[in-house]
Amino acid sequence: MIIALEGGEGCGKGTIAKWLNEEHGFIELHDPGSSPLSLQMREILLHKTDLDMDDRQLALAFEVCHADNLKQAMKYAANGSNVVLDRTYLSNYAHRMAKGMPMAHLKILNQLFLPETACVEKILYLACPWEARKARMLARPGGGKDRFESRGDQFHLDVERAYDSLAASGMAVRLDASGDVASVKRLVAAQLGLTVA
């Protein structure tokens, strides 16, 4: 089984992915960042903020990361492992749509260059209001902000609206992630047929 966790910054994807890995044996893959190629791409896309990239360039560059990540996930799944993706191609949709790129253009891009999307059995959108996510991010210990975390409130609100739209269209299952970690675990477990210790 290959499943993906999606949502805006601070929604709890990393926490839930770690729980699925530690408690339920899922292999955890980060997009980008789970192979030598995507690690280098991650550095460019998230942290090289001095490099000016427009949304068309970002859409294409992230597509490379998604293809690499899904190829890895398929290999693990073929060997009988369950895989959880901390972000996948739906992030590209949400972030580009937030900047005005039409969903239809992104769908064409995926149809042409990312047939691997079919391997993702379920995408769980961890929905949480921006103000709550912002507070979580401010409470994180250390570390700077990447290209997307550092953008203003309006961008994060637009990303949130894009995710809501994607979930409403049936591309993801929307889960209320505004509660405590235990409640979110229960919601995720119910979707995946798992038990919560």
Image (cartoon, rainbow, N blue to C red):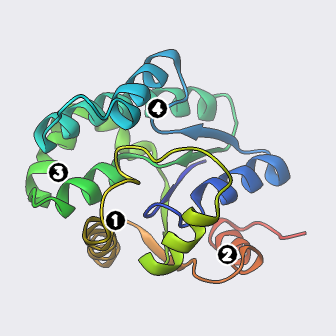
Residue at which label 4 appears: 69
First reached walking from the N terminus: tag 1 or tag 3? 3
Residue at which label 1 appears: 171
Local secondary structure at mark 2: helix
Residue 21 drawn above or below residue 152: above
- x then y, percent, for residue 197: 91, 69
First reached walking from the N terminus: tag 4 or tag 1? 4
Residue at image position (79%, 45%) is 25
Disc 2 from disc 3: Cα separation: 29 Å
Q: Quick check: marks 1 and 3 in contact, CB under 8 Å?
A: no
The image quadrant that residue 192 belongs to is bottom right
Disc 3 residue crowd, few under 14, some 14–19, many 20+, Cα 10 Å: few
The image quadrant that residue 94 belongs to is bottom left
First reached walking from the N terminus: tag 2 or tag 1? 1
Amino acid type shown at disc 2: Val
Q: Is residue 22 visible?
A: yes
- x then y, percent, for residue 144: 51, 44
Question: Which label number is shown at residue 126?
Answer: none
Disc 4 from disc 1: Cα separation: 19 Å
Residue at which label 2 appears: 184
Local secondary structure at mark 3: helix
21 sits to left or right of 164: right
Disc 3 from disc 4: Cα separation: 18 Å
Residue at image position (51%, 30%) is 33
Amino acid type shown at disc 3: Lys
Q: Nearer the viewer, mark 2 or mark 1?
A: 2
Local secondary structure at mark 4: helix
First reached walking from the N terminus: tag 2 or tag 4? 4
Residue at which label 3 appears: 107
Disc 1 from disc 3: Cα separation: 11 Å
Disc 1 residue crowd, few under 14, some 14–19, many 20+, Cα 10 Å: some
Residue at image position (35%, 26%) is 44
